[in-house]
Amino acid sequence: MHAITLTEPGTVLEPSELVLNPDGSVYHLALRPEQLGDLIIVVGDQGRVEKVSRHFERIEHRVQNREFVAHTGVYHGMHITALSTGIGTDNIDIVLNELDALVNIDLASRSPKRDHKRLRIVRLGTCGSLQEDIPVDSRIVSAFGVGLDNVLHYYAYENTDAENRLLNGFLAHCEWPDNLPVPYVAAGDKELIERLGHGNTVGITITSGGFYGPQGRQLRILPSVDGLNERISAFAHEDLRACNYEMETSALYGLGGLLGHRTCTVCTVVANRLRKDYSKDHHAAIDRMIGEVLERLAG
């Protein structure tokens, strides 16, 4: 996925469009450029930031604003920022745009820079498995994100051939219902996927716009489409299966692609939707994921 066009360097962005705090930090993340690491680890849960930063040799900066908590420090010589995003693609829209602004916009002049900086942004999350043979406490690395939300439809983009093939296959296989938003597809960074995928399951991740009805859960309200999860679970494309549900990857991959950053998602499976199984100790499994990913990224 890539942008049809980007704002020209030298264009002045008005205060209503690029909103900054009085100290010069970006509006939601409350970070300034010098407070951002070269590698960004994004997590949904605020408490998971400390689980990442406890691995650092030292922490140089801490900040919290709303659900956005950031710890920047050093791990094996790398400057890393661990950042919480909260839940959902709407928050990823905020996070990706503001991370990009920190490195690719001159905040003093409010103008895009001529030289582009490419960030590595890796999401460490949790998910529900859509395949019976992918057990709880294992890890899934997302080759593609299929967005059942609508965030990327508000941006001007073009898909790659690989993304278009997957999207067309998914729509045809699922006989996509007219009453639901049209999905979109975005690919992750191939090198990061290869590095982090070794020994883990690599597949297609379905990003939902909600946790209950949008993922086929029924408490008191009936889902509008019967059997959608079964259709999705049965989808396979070019040796990749639809492996899991979560709520952020499609926007991470889509906006990362549009802005020229390298993105990857690794999720610990906390629920198997087909087995109706839930992890008995997902905290330990998440800790193992964090340790593995940091070691592989530092290698």
Image (cartoon, rainbow, N blue to C red):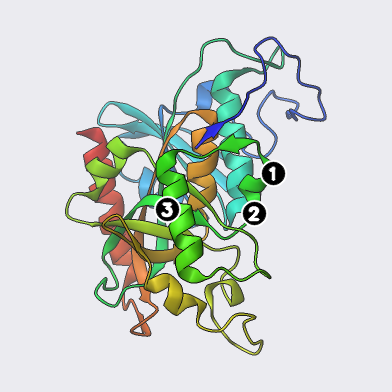
Distance CA(mark 3)–CA(mark 1): 21 Å
Q: Please give the residue where the numbered disc 2 appears in the rendered image.
A: 150
- Residue at x-position 34% and y-position 46%: 54
| Rendering coords of residue 34 (x, y %) | 52, 21
Circle number at residue 166: 3
Is label 2 in contact with label 1 (beta carbons under 8 Å)? yes
Image vertical order of residue 9 relative to residue 230, above or below? above
Within 10 Å of disc 1 (Cα), the crowding (few <14, some 14-19, many 20+) is few
- Residue at x-position 38% and y-position 75%: 271
Q: Secondary structure at mark 3?
A: helix
- Residue at x-position 49% and y-position 70%: 174
Amino acid bearing label 1? Tyr
Q: Please give the residue where the numbered disc 1 appears in the rendered image.
A: 154
| Rendering coords of residue 209 (x, y %) | 60, 63
Distance CA(mark 2)–CA(mark 3): 18 Å
- Residue at x-position 66% and y-position 27%: 25
Image vertical order of residue 175 relative to residue 69, above or below? below
- Based on the displayed image, in which of its 4 quarters is residue 211 positioned? bottom right
Position of 113 compared to 20: left or right?
left
Q: Residue furthest left?
A: 199
Image vertical order of residue 93 relative to residue 237, above or below? above
Within 10 Å of disc 2 (Cα), the crowding (few <14, some 14-19, many 20+) is some
**First in residue order: circle 3 vs circle 1:** 1
**First in residue order: circle 2 vs circle 3:** 2
